[in-house]
Image (cartoon, helix red, strand yellow):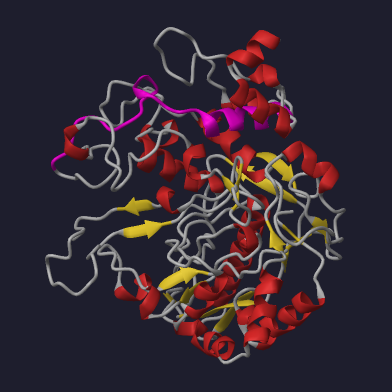
């Protein structure tokens, strides 16, 4: 055992810190081969219950931390001249044959972009499942970047893609369950509208209003008054624009974009989707354990408030911040159903496993309605954030470029830099950069005295991220419903 630890200390330390089974990991072979190795988990073993929760989490950790190489299927194949932008047929930077960096092919492992637990200490705390610093920002689907500002000399490097700072995994199960239940509610309201032609039906779920809908006598729907969600009424909480309904959906896209790893459930069994000579690059089972790993991550928490923090909390409400940053939302259920294959408009179909949200991790507090309370400080809705934060993404409308899903503030004390692209380096900066629907709240904050502003920041600094050592969190996290006491900085 000593020899094994000396040979590969980082991954074993991670496994031990997580309380997982060290035996689930194999030492790298000295021979050249795929880093995923010969051990490829079968989705059937996840369904039949032969693997424990700890084993499945260990497998998910293995996928999350594996640096994929060419023999795993890393990278795209030959460039597709008909579509050089989408994953599968992209060029590489300078023809290096491996990396592109702008528009993906920018990392080898999930861990590279999700490694910072807290930026509130110096040096920062590093760990698995955290946010990424600015160097980890993804540059998504650009066709033009005027880095030297040669085009118009206006002091801006013109860019028509998206620039995205990586979020953390913590609390993902609560967010996913909320979105599932909200989708169920909205679809039920849609059906109600169809059954009552001519009646305008308000789309309200968990206290969040998504506009309204009306049907004609033939069952046709007028969705022109729908707001903050796509016209299909599927609440997609992951991605800055609300693109992904589940962590699995997010992972499918990330595998292709960042690594050129083609999931079997996208291209088919035995199919070389990107023509790089490798088939079955990411199996159904591997995506399933990756989803289990993400949805069993612990939740963020809140420190007990100081007197200044209490004042700041009251100001947060008075300023109107809580209109979008809802302190908490409640689920009806205590378990998240994981689905494969998933049908977005039938969220209870094809369930292969349930994740209990009240266990040590994720560790959400039960509520009086039979579900759990998710203290996310968000509403899972898109909002217009004004021209100052608008992107210049050529593939969507100008209206959509101004819209972002409400940022979840839980953990914000630890997760600088802020905003969708990390442009804000302080909490004061991020508030003052708000516009659009948040302009009034922003102006009220700007008008506060320096002391009152400091109180708001003190409140926000109580919203902490877990330290990433999942096995210790069971002992150190407060019991459901209680707030943890401790030092205010770097706890």
Which of 43 and 129 lies nearest the eye of the viewer?
129
For residue 413, above or below residue 433: above
Pinpoint residue 298: horizontal percent, then vertical percent.
71, 47
Q: Position of residue 245 (x, y in %)?
A: 53, 54
Position of the C terminus by quadrant = bottom right
Q: Which residues are magenta?
A: 53-81
Is residue 440 in the magenta section?
no
Position above or below: 184 against 51: below
Outermost residue, front side? 122
In this rendering, does residue 47 appear at all?
no
How many marks do you count on the picture? 0
Left or right, 310 with reference to 33: right
Q: Is residue 440 rendered to the left or right of residue 393?
A: right
In the picture provided, is 87 more to the left or to the right than 228?
left
Please report the residue visible at 54 percent of the width from the left and 60 percent of the height from the top: 416
Q: Is residue 427 visible?
A: yes
* Residue placed most toward the observer, 332 or 214: 332
Q: Quadrant of the N terminus?
A: top right
Residue name at image x 63 percent, y 38 percent: 293
Q: Is residue 394 above or below residue 439?
A: above
Residue drawn at 30 percent across, 41 percent down: 87
Q: How far across and how far down the image is residue 463, in percent?
A: 70, 63
User: To which quarter of the image does residue 115 belong?
Assistant: top right
Frontmost residue, 214 versus 412:
412
**Going 36% across and 79% down the picture, which residue do you hit?**
387
| Quadrant of the image occupied by residue 351 | top right
């Amino acid at each position: 055992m000593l020899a094994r630890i000396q040979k590969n200390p980082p991954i074993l330390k991670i496994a031990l810190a997580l309380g997982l089974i060290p035996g689930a990991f194999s030492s790298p072979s000295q021979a050249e081969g795929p880093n995923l190795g010969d051990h490829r988990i079968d989705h059937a073993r996840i369904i039949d219950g032969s693997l424990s929760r700890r084993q499945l989490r260990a497998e998910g950790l293995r996928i999350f931390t594996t640096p994929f190489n060419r023999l795993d299927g890393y990278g795209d194949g030959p460039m597709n001249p008909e579509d050089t932008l989408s994953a599968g047929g992209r060029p590489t930077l300078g023809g290096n044959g491996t990396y592109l960096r702008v528009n993906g092919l920018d990392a080898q492992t999930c861990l590279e972009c999700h490694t910072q637990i807290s930026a509130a200490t110096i040096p920062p705390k590093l760990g698995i499942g955290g946010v990424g610093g600015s160097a980890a920002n993804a540059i998504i689907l650009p066709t033009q970047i005027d880095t030297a500002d040669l085009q118009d000399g206006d002091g801006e490097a013109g860019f028509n893609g998206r620039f995205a700072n990586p979020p953390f995994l913590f609390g993902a199960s609560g967010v996913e369950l909320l979105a599932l239940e909200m989708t169920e509610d909205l679809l039920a309201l849609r059906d109600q509208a169809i059954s009552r032609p001519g009646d305008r039906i308000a789309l309200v779920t968990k206290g969040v209003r998504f506009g309204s809908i009306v049907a004609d006598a033939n069952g046709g729907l007028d969705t022109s008054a729908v707001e903050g969600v796509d016209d299909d009424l599927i609440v997609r909480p992951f991605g800055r624009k609300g693109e992904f309904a589940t962590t699995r959906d997010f992972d499918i896209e990330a595998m292709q974009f960042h690594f050129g790893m083609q999931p079997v459930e996208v291209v088919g069994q035995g199919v070389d989707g990107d023509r790089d000579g490798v088939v079955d690059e990411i199996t159904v089972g591997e995506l399933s354990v990756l989803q289990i790993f993400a949805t069993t991550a612990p939740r963020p928490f809140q420190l007990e408030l100081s007197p200044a923090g209490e004042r700041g909390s009251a100001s947060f409400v008075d300023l109107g911040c809580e209109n979008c940053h809802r302190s908490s939302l409640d689920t009806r259920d205590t378990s998240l159903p994981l689905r494969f294959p998933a049908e977005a408009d039938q969220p209870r179909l094809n369930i292969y496993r349930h994740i209990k949200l009240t266990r040590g991790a994720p560790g959400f507090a039960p509520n009086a309605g039979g579900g759990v309370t998710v203290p996310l400080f968000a509403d899972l809705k898109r909002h217009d954030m004004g021209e100052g934060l608008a992107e210049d993404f050529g593939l969507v409308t100008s209206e959509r470029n101004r819209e972002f899903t409400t940022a979840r503030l839980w953990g914000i004390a630890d997760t600088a830099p802020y905003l969708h692209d990390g442009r804000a380096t302080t909490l004061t900066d991020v508030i003052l950069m708000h516009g659009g629907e948040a302009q009034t709240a922003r102006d009220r904050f700007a008008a506060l005295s320096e002391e009152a502003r400091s109180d708001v920041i003190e409140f926000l600094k109580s919203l902490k991220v877990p330290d990433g050592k999942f096995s210790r969190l069971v002992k150190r996290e407060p019991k459901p419903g209680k707030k943890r006491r401790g030092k205010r900085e770097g706890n």
